[in-house]
Amino acid sequence: MTVLQNLPRKKTEPVQSSMVIAGARPHDDQTEALAASIFRDFKSDFRYKEYVLGCINCGECTTGCPAARFYNFSPREMLQIAYQDDPLVLLDAMQEKIWACCQCYTCNMRCRFGNDIAGIISVMRELAVKNGLESAKEVLKPYSRILLVVMTKGTQVSPDMIQPDFFADWGPFAVARQTDIKTLRKAIPVDVLQVTDSSWEVSMQTSLELFQIYKEAGVVDMLKSIDPDLVEMIEDIVDEWREEFEEMKEKYGIGV
Amino acid sequence: MLNADQIRDVLSERANARIYSDKKVHDVREEMWNLHEKGELVVIPIEQKNKPIEVETLFGWKKKIPTDYLWHHKSCGQCGNIPGYPSSLLWFMNQFKTNYLNEPHQTSCTAWNYHGSGTSNPIALAAVAVRNWYRAYETGTFPLIHCGTSFGDYKEMRKLLVENKEVRDKVRDIMHHMGKELVIPEEIVHYSEWVHVKRKEMASMVKMKMDGITATVHEPCHYYKMVPEDAVYEKDTNGGQRPAPPTAVVQALGAKVADYSTWYDCCGFGFRHILTEREFSRSFATLRKIKPMVEEAHADVAITTDTGCVTTLDKSQWIGKSHGMDYMLPVLSDVQFAALAAGAHPYKIVQIHWHSSPTDKLLEKMGFDVAFYKKDFSNYIEELQKGKEPEMLYKPHDEMEKYFAVNKGHVIMDN
């Protein structure tokens, strides 16, 4: 028995669609249907019950939030949106605000309820991608090379991504070394790091197993909503690798 | 003012009996072993050959840090743009005659994608984790996680696999389709914890001048905020109020650790932000981290223990000159700093030329003949360009390992 037992618990009755959260946009029937569908998936996700536990609007989360200092973003607001039952407000937050979060987990550590605010924002992002929301497409536009590498090699940043015209703000040292990146990579005394198109050399077996995971876990289908051309390209690459892999098995006399 | 013991008691009480919600913090490792007994999963044990050293975590729970027969779970960001980070670690392991595997049969945790862009899901993340862990398991080694995010993500995946039967069953199915088992390591261990427990041995190797060096520490969020109860704390370091690594390491090496007001802040990395919204990352890093480190603490160097933090704090500084913020504070990982202290080659081993913020002043203060090492490295580059074989920290993998993970059970550095 504690003194705080009388705090408001989670709402059980749905409330009318409201404009409580500033910035909600006009909507039509199609938008309402999409919002309702996302809302159902959101509330029924197994993580929801574990991540959203309650909120007294203390704002501890926002006080420590790096994104809140520079964006129109507040983890407190995100949690309130997750907590209430308003599909349109949820959809509206998914159009822009969720992408500001740094996923640093400072809010989680500060939250006295033990809410996983960064986690629930990840669930929102995942649903934005799955439902092919424009915000997700926009955010991921400059990300296609990274997605290609992560889907095929399972690594993210490759040395040859740091191109001078795109990373000029990193200064002359970051840019100058691009002049002979192959030799500089060769000068790293670790064999698997002596590549330029991936963080490290990833064996073909590993890449194929990774793609099998993505396929079976539904990530490939999820990405089709965002960038079907990219998925087609990835599938072509993987098909070619499968053929080469079979050839290599014969060459080396290996039954993997 | 509470002492370290009292603070730990307060934290434990708060975690064990959260009064605002029903969420309790419990040790997931107990249930993990129960599931192992029931045959639901296989725990990769820390054995005698791993030469474990025991440490304490936030609530005083015990954690075993294996120090031998290790499987390097590399970091995509480190290997991609801070290669001196892993090479310094491998260099130390060679000095200590540690047995290890550093393989091409690893993927990243892929959590960068999940946290950065939402382009993954819990099943995929958990299966990726288990596939990597299994590779360590089948080679008789224990995974050592280089990246802070992978470290945090893998602890989340461990919890998920232990607590959620549906996820566990699905991931086990995927593993079976690949001829693998559902395995979970007995502990999820960050490389900085290995460095932490080896710090006295590292300190005994110090050759350079360290007593005049002032360092500031940036504690990576994903090391201690994602799963707070598993981070290493010591009563004698930071008053038990902040994680012990890397402060204890820096102090053991003989440098001074200076405090600054924004120690708790994130670095501003933000996953996607560091690549496609850098105006945010560099503003936050410069204003909230680098500025106080220089103006309040008068630091010679910033030390941290994660990929994104080194990248963000290091790369974000140069553009600050356009706003009159010419700080140019060197940023290194703990293990790079330790390697330098032990006299490792700043360019061949510590690969310091990949960093954007200039390090010459720091190297000079530590007693390095910078011109000599620069010339030496420049000569080495010329030799490589002429076709000389590169110097290596271990025997390179066979050609066939570009395709197949075939060296099961064979540890490259087996002594």
Image (cartoon, coloured by chain):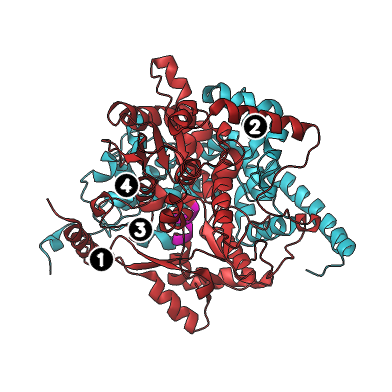
Residue denoted by label 3: B232
Chain letter, red in picture: B
**Mark 4, chain letter?**
A
**Mark 2, chain letter?**
B
Nearer the N terminus, badge 1 or badge 2? 1
Mark identifier at residue B377: 2
**Which is nearer the eye, B164 or B61?**
B61
Q: Residues within 10 Å of mark 1 (few under 14, many from 20)?
A: few
Looking at the rendered structure, the kind of residue marked 2 is Phe
Looking at the rendered structure, the kind of residue marked 1 is Asp
Q: Position of residue B20 (x, y in %)?
A: 20, 60
Residue denoted by label 1: B22
Q: Residues within 10 Å of mark 2 (few under 14, many from 20)?
A: some
- Report the Cα–Cα distance between label 1 and label 2: 59 Å
Per the image, label 4 sits on a secondary structure element best described as helix
| Viewer-side label of 4, 3 | 3
Looking at the rendered structure, the kind of residue marked 3 is Val
Looking at the rendered structure, the kind of residue marked 4 is Cys
Q: Quadrant of residue B33?
A: bottom left
The question of residue A222 being in magenta is answered with no
Q: Are marks 1 and 4 on the same chain?
A: no
Nearer the N terminus, badge 3 or badge 1? 1
Nearer the N terminus, badge 3 or badge 2? 3
- Report the Cα–Cα distance between label 3 and label 2: 37 Å
**Which is nearer the eye, A47 or A44?**
A47
Per the image, label 1 sits on a secondary structure element best described as loop
Residue denoted by label 4: A107
